[in-house]
């Protein structure tokens, strides 16, 4: 088997798995579904669903967890004549327990879910990134069709760039510092105003390993989402290496957008 993942993965899917199934056929039906979650750690997901699913695991349900950076995949599987019913009941129960944290199924990626949601609603997005250095824009533009929703992605790393391209006020920077809720708000609102996008995400933070203070330790980040109604701000502390910090922060920003869009859909439908 080849070593590089890009060569190994298609060969394994297209040749190895069919060969294994041919030589070692499964007895009876096999049903499997993977729910993609974000915002909860693996242990928390397990803690919330283990007891409620016990009667189903006793009946043959198999539950698997796969923790990835910024998300946890939850695999529900069963074999035999009643497999479909068992997996369906398990999925319904899991959605009742942690549904707000489920962003997709099977091979879904959060950025693809975002592009799909915005495309369906004919809405647009602008990005103003500092500490993530374009990570959010990179993830969005990896999705085919992203050009229909992404209007602009700005990496405003310096204070001067924040003022020049986003309209962040000098007094806000002087009073609160670049890593602050007021600056994140002005970044998001400025990006939305200048591009005309329906939504604008802004991130500013301290990726480390240096630069932290007692009041703003390494890992501090402010994530702002500006809409036509309100500007939301999250303030997590992501204590990771720089690369992981950027990805986790991008995940939190995209999840904030996903939940906001879905909430607007619910409000419209009611």
Image (spheres, rainbow, N blue to C red):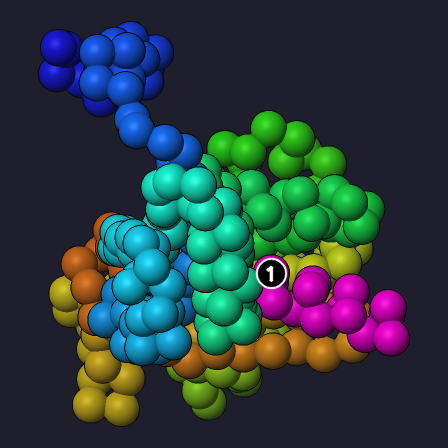
In which image quadrant can residue 190 be found?
Answer: bottom right
Q: Is residue 179 visible?
A: no
Q: State the image coordinates of residue 179 (x, y, percent, origin top left).
A: 39, 76
Q: Residues within 10 Å of mark 1 (few under 14, many from 20)?
A: some
Instruction: Give the side of residue 233 with respect to residue 32, left or right.
Output: right
Q: Main secondary structure of the magenta part?
A: helix
Assess whether residue 224 is covered by the magenta stretch. no
Q: Is residue 81 above or below residue 7?
A: below
Assess whether residue 262 is covered by the magenta stretch. yes
Which quadrant, please, contains the C terminus? bottom right
Which quadrant, please, contains the N terminus? top left
Q: Residue at x 74, y 43 (%)?
A: 119
Task: Name the residue furthest front.
Answer: 81
Under circle 1, the secondary element is helix
Q: State the image coordinates of residue 60 (x, y, percent, origin top left).
A: 31, 54
Instruction: Give the side of residue 228 with respect to residue 257, left or right.
Output: right
Residue position marked by numbered label 1 in the rendering = 258
Q: Of residues 265 and 47, which is closer to you in this image?
A: 47
Q: State the image coordinates of residue 49 (x, y, percent, origin top left).
A: 36, 72
Q: Residue at x 54, y 79 (%)?
A: 233
Q: Is residue 93 above or below residue 231?
A: above
Instruction: Give the side of residue 19 with respect to residue 1, left or right.
Output: right
Q: Of residues 229 and 35, which is closer to you in this image?
A: 35
Q: Is residue 236 above or below residue 264?
A: below
Please provide the residue range marked out in magenta: 255-270
Q: Is residue 218 visible?
A: yes
Q: Residue at x 51, y 60 (%)?
A: 89
Q: State the image coordinates of residue 257 (x, y, percent, origin top left).
A: 60, 63
Q: Of residues 25 and 110, which is closer to you in this image?
A: 25
Instruction: Give the side of residue 16 with respect to residue 103, left or right.
Output: left
Q: Residue at x 69, y 63 (%)?
A: 261
């Amino acid at each position: 088997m080849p070593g590089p993942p890009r060569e190994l993965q298609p060969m394994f899917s297209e040749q190895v798995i069919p060969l294994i199934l041919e030589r070692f056929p499964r007895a009876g039906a096999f049903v499997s579904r993977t729910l993609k979650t974000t915002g909860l750690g693996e242990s928390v997901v397990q803690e919330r669903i283990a007891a409620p699913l016990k009667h189903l695991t006793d009946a043959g349900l198999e539950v698997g967890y796969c923790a990835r950076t910024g998300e946890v995949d939850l695999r529900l599987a069963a074999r035999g004549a009643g497999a479909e019913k068992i997996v369906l009941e398990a999925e319904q129960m899991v959605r009742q327990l942690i549904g707000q944290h489920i962003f997709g199924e099977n091979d879904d990626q959060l950025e693809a879910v975002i592009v799909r949601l915005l495309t369906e609603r004919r809405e647009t997005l602008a990005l103003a990134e500092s500490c993530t250095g374009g990570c959010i824009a990179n993830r969005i533009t990896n999705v085919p069709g992203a050009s229909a929703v992404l209007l602009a992605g700005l990496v405003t790393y310096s204070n001067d760039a924040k003022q020049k391209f986003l309209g962040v006020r000098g007094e806000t920077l002087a009073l609160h510092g670049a890593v602050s809720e007021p600056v994140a708000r002005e970044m998001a609102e400025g990006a939305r105003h200048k591009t005309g996008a329906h939504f604008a995400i802004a991130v500013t933070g301290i990726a480390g390993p240096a630069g932290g203070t007692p009041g703003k330790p390494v890992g501090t980040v402010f994530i702002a989402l500006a809409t036509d109604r309100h500007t939301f701000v999250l303030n997590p502390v992501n204590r990771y290496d720089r690369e992981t910090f950027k990805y986790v922060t991008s995940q939190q920003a995209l999840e904030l957008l996903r939940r906001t869009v879905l909430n607007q859909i619910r409000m419209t439908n009611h």
